[in-house]
Amino acid sequence: MAYVFTFWTCYVLLKEYEIVESMRLHFIATERRRPDQFTVLVRNIPPDPDESTSELVEHFFLVNHPDHYLTHQVVYNANNLAKLVKKKKQMQNWLDYYQLKYNRNPSKRPTCKTGFLGLWGSTVDAIEFYISEIEKLSKEEEIEREKVRKDPKSVVPAAFVSFRTRWGAAVCAQTQQTRNPTQWLTDWAPEPRDVYWQNLAIPFVYLTIRRLIVIVALFFLTFFYVIPIAFVQSLANIEGIEKAAPFLKKLIEKHVIKSFIQGFLPGIALKIFLILLPTILMFMSKFEGYTSLSSLERKSAGKYYIFLFVNVFLCSIITGTALQQLDVFIHQSPNQIPKTIGASILMKATFFITFIMVDGWAGIAGEVLRLKPLIIFHLKNFFLVKTEKDREEAMDPGSIGFDSSEPQIQLYFLLGLAYAVVTPFLLPFIIIFFGLAYVVFRHQIINVYNQEYESAAAFWPSVHGRIITALIISQLVLLGLLSTKNAAQSTPVLLALPILTIWFHLYCKNRYEPAFVKYPLQEAMMKDTLERAREPNLDLKAYLSNAYIHPVFKGGEEDDDFSIADEQEYEQVLVPTKRQSRKNTPVPSKYNGSSSPSLPDVAQEP
């Protein structure tokens, strides 16, 4: 039966990979024109004392991609400006609220307090106060805008470079640009609405350090999360509260309050932490420096799955916390770990059936009712909503949240595969869950949630990898279980299963995954040829000119500093540069962005 389930799972995964790959390629081939099809994100641009970043980018791509380079947009560190813009919008919202309030009752001018959250401070006329605050912020915003425009330090060593064809963009995105593989790093640009602008300002050299820090933090969060929970729960007992706040002793000694503290408060503390967990993991992914919302959600989903595997699956099978399990696993040989898990898994089948019904079935019902968003909306409506704009934002259903929903669904894949051979009685509960989940989530995605970005099924390789991981874990658990039953003759037969599963995963990775990380040049050329035939007079530069300008610069008057350089001639081969000729320069440029010719009649003085 282990072989049957393994081969059936691999067969279904293979067919699904084929379907998803063909759907992705078909979608890419037939979708409408988008800026990211022509654009590459270039990072770690080396500094040059003779040229600005914008001039250096233009020169590099005119030399190395002369027939395909079209235009570029350098990236500015506008994070401070974005904060000012956001704060100004909040102030404008408050002004709209008080003006609306005054229009309803002109006989009385609205007032507010100038302190924190309007709780204290001197009482002033609300309309005049917010008008003056908006004027101050407008001046600060203009100063910051000028600073970003004029200060060379505001330019980040990164740029969005656009090409005349999809073929040219594909060649650039998927090739190494210079001898030094750590400079002029190119990758496909996210679509404009998918860009996470705050992380573009992070220096590339810091990314490795940040990711190492996050790996360590994730380890401690996964295995030591019991410490903050234990601390909160320690406060949720009668003695702890009486020591911390002696004046509450008479109140908490009442029967109803005492029962609530002892019965509900520890569970509420744990539930609050688990609700906040996806937010914590998303913050960690943002700290790592990923530059698109889709990649942030993919990385957060991976972290969440690790957490669920350790603290739901392993913690439930092996009695004790993850910290205690870690101590047990460290002090025993690796071949004993499958035995430990295998010996315990049978006893927890009933628990997981209950878990599937309570967490899975009830969770699907909660997804239909959307009780949590409904409660949050009413809380926002009561405390925060001031204008119609606030009400629209409060009613916004948001996106589906792949970073939290997808790992939870994959946990049930793990449970189903782990118990398929050991306790098949659990399978009907899993099948009912997936049937309900398919119907409900299909409806929610089509009719309820907004689409925040388009990733063209970029999540699938991660989903496939986690299902393969679950399959290997189920095989190791079965090996451990049979070893406790003295079935030594079955071990060599079952050892082939993990090896075959890993071979299958490598086959799928080599055969299908390239379609999810690369763009075939044949497809790019076909789409370019069709577009040229259908729209021979297309002004691609005008289409791409404002696609990758930071949102805080859109909609306002933009200086020449933010305009994109004029298009160069197609036939240009030798590119004039501000970099001096090596023949008459005592000290040549330390950072050569390209192999520029050193002829004096080509290299011109500024």
Image (cartoon, rainbow, N blue to C red):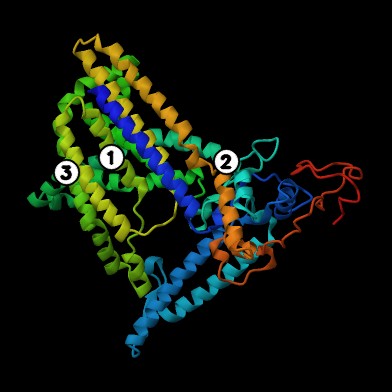
The residue indicated by pointer 3 is 358
Q: Is residue 78 visible?
A: yes
Which percent across, then down, holds residue 496? 34, 17
Q: Position of residue 293 (x, y in %)?
A: 46, 51
Number of numbered discs on residues: 3
Q: Position of residue 470 (x, y in %)?
A: 31, 30
Q: Secondary structure at mark 2?
A: helix
Residue 16: horizontal and vertical position, in percent? 35, 39
Q: Amino acid at mark 3?
A: Val
Give whichever of discs 3 and 1 has the lower sequence position. 1
Q: Residue furthest bottom?
A: 107
Of discs 3 and 1, which sits in the foreground?
Answer: 3
Residue 396 located left or right of residue 455: left
**In this view of the protein, which residue sits in the foreground, 375 or 108?**
375
For the residues labelled 3 and 1, the Cα–Cα distance comes to 22 Å
Name the side, left or right, on which 183 lies relative to 443.
Answer: right
Please tell me the numbered disc located at residue 229.
1
**Residue occupying image coordinates x 27% and y 42%:** 232
Choose between 474 and 150: the one closer to the eye. 474
Pick out the residue farthest to the front. 533
Front in this rendered view, residue 351 or 446: 446
In this view, 289 is above or below 335:
below
Look at mark 2 in the image and give the residue it sits on: 206
Between tags 2 and 1, which lies in front?
2
